[in-house]
Image: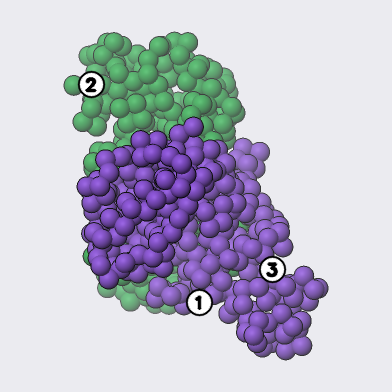
Chain colours: A purple, B green
């Protein structure tokens, strides 16, 4: 059994895990990034964290075949540089070069959402597929595309911004400043706005009983729909259509074997998934006998996707 | 200098050319496909056509390093099979296997639009780029995506249907049966419909003077705009915005180094290109200092893109 380390870098915590070649996490640990100390100090801390998890796993450095890093922001994977990551203060951070001062091991770095997509494709919902994509329905909408087994990064890591595909010209305003982006409709933020609108229109709806601390959340409509509420069911029907519209668009371009959905909203489970699958199978381009419609499935790795995905970079 | 053969298969004609490693066509020739005789007969005819162009070029079979085929329809490139091509009556046509009965040479097959994208990326408007895409504005809208120097085919060749990305949910009806597809707005067909509408609204427009045989074409609005007509200028402003909206969407996903435009409508040249570039540079996602906005350029290979692109498959 070969072992790898995956490091999931975030603004609040840096998680490292020893991952075996079957994609299982053997041991993991976490540190808080010393953002004020600067990027080079963080590289050193990540090396120390590696030594710690290796020891915890009862292994030695020589047992580790590679270390992969997943970082937020823009990553130039070819050059091993994190071009920009606001929360961490990274600017043109030559992470792989810096890390090699401490440990001469095979390394790679990728954007964290792309790493999660790779992890989910290798070991999660898209197991053993060569062509897949991963959609995260959270505060925003994130995407990661796997083409022939490899992450699609775009030139200098600038691609894969699938939340900002325009599905309705002149439509809702998006956080990016444009109008009609998928994210404006299919994110939790979009769902909350749609739920609030429906609640105003149908003040007697059961959605009033599924608020949390008096507030609409991404769960409000799903829970009321489960109670049989008509207005809530309409909200999730429409929301599922928004989610599916972007997925159909991306299927027509990429035609993957499977599409994985993750992020907070995906916890709704089958009530969402069944609707999305129905819409997708009806609206994908082409003859289904020639080009089968890919199945939409739930992501399986949860919070571990980042660590496992980062480790997958060096497998 | 190494030589290759590119074969551009079409319903009306099959074109073959000897192409050198600089992407120049040395000699070419054409046959009419004997569709009624069936697919195996066409394979034999293509072999005979190869022998003919080789002789014409003053070469011998041993001088040819490979033969590439570009076919319409769905192509399973990994298996060397044309799954389906309506105009030619191809169904599960194992072209590479059939062709190998006549000539044991390196071969490859791809979808014709994808081949053109590869040819344009290697030797045309996107010369020497690794990440690029090609958009054909014709009766429909076709796309071909080059990722890290390779064609994006999707699973079993079912991808790259970029004409059918939904840019306006619930919008114009598309030939595919769906609503709001990019093709419904950005194709010549879409432009003609937009021009006809404007002509109805502004019957005194100079567009009345740029009709052809009393009919609106894809040129009508461009030519009247060149004469300074306001209504026509408004038509092409809006049309360019439709073209650019789909391009921005695809740039946000792929972030290529360059985007090439071809097809009949692209003959309008700078009057279209300048508008598309302006819109794209304003509306692409992200910080331009980190991720430069790709330039939109005209395709350069014209009708030869098919032959050169098919040959590129085996280079």
- Return the x and y of residue B292 as percentages of the image width and height: 26, 60
Which residue is label 2 attached to? B2
The image quadrant where one finds the N terminus of chain B is top left
Q: Chain of mark 3?
A: A
Relative to B282, A298 lies left or right: right
Q: Residue at x 37, y 53 (%)?
A: A49
Q: Residue at x 53, y 29 (%)?
A: B82
Q: Chain of mark 2?
A: B
Using the image as rendered, state which of residue A231 and residue B265 is in the foreground: A231
Measure the alpha-carbon separation of dots 2 and 1.
54 Å
Which residue is label 3 attached to? A237
Measure the alpha-carbon separation of dots 3 and 2.
58 Å
Q: Earlier in the sequence, mark 3 or mark 1?
A: 1
Circle 2 crowding by C-alpha within 10 Å: few under 14, some 14–19, many from 20: few
- At mark 2, the secondary structure is loop
The image quadrant where one finds the C terminus of chain B is top left
Residue A172: image tag:
1
Work out whether B49 lies above or below A236: above
Using the image as rendered, state which of residue B257 and residue A18 is in the foreground: A18
Residue A241: image tag:
none
Q: Quadrant of residue B5?
A: top left
- Res. B240 visible in picture: no
- Res. A57 visible in picture: yes
Q: Residue at x 33, y 72 (%)?
A: B233
Q: Are both tags, 3 and 1, on one chain?
A: yes
Q: Residue at x 39, y 50 (%)?
A: A52
- Return the x and y of residue A231 as percentages of the image width and height: 74, 78
């Amino acid at each position: 059994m070969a072992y790898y380390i995956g490091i999931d870098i975030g603004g609040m915590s840096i998680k490292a895990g020893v991952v075996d070649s079957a994609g299982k996490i053997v041991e993991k640990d976490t540190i808080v990034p010393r953002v004020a100390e600067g990027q080079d100090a963080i590289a050193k801390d990540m090396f120390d964290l590696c030594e710690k998890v290796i020891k915890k796993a009862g292994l030695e450095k020589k047992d580790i075949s590679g270390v992969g890093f997943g970082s937020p922001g823009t990553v130039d994977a070819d050059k091993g540089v994190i071009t920009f990551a606001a929360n961490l203060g990274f600017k043109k951070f030559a992470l792989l070069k810096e890390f090699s001062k401490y440990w001469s091991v095979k390394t790679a770095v990728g954007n964290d959402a792309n790493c999660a997509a790779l992890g989910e494709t290798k070991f999660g919902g898209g197991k053993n597929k060569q062509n897949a994509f991963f959609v995260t329905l959270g505060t925003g909408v994130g995407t990661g595309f796997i083409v022939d087994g490899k992450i699609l990064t775009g030139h200098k890591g600038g691609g894969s911004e699938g939340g900002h595909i325009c599905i309705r010209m002149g439509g809702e305003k998006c956080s990016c400043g444009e109008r009609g982006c998928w994210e404006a409709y299919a994110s939790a933020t979009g769902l909350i706005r749609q739920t609030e609108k429906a609640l105003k229109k149908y003040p007697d709806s059961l959605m009033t009983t599924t608020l949390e601390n008096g507030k609409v959340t991404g769960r409000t409509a799903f829970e009321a729909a489960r109670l049989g509420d008509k207005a809530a069911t309409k909200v999730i029907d429409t929301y599922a259509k928004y989610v599916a519209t972007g997925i159909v668009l991306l299927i027509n371009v990429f035609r993957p074997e499977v599409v994985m959905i993750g992020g907070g909203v995906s916890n709704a489970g089958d009530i969402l998934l069944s609707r999305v699958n129905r819409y997708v199978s009806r609206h994908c381009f082409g003859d289904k006998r020639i080009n089968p419609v890919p199945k939409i499935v739930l992501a399986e790795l949860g919070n571990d996707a980042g660590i496992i995905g980062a480790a997958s970079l060096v497998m």
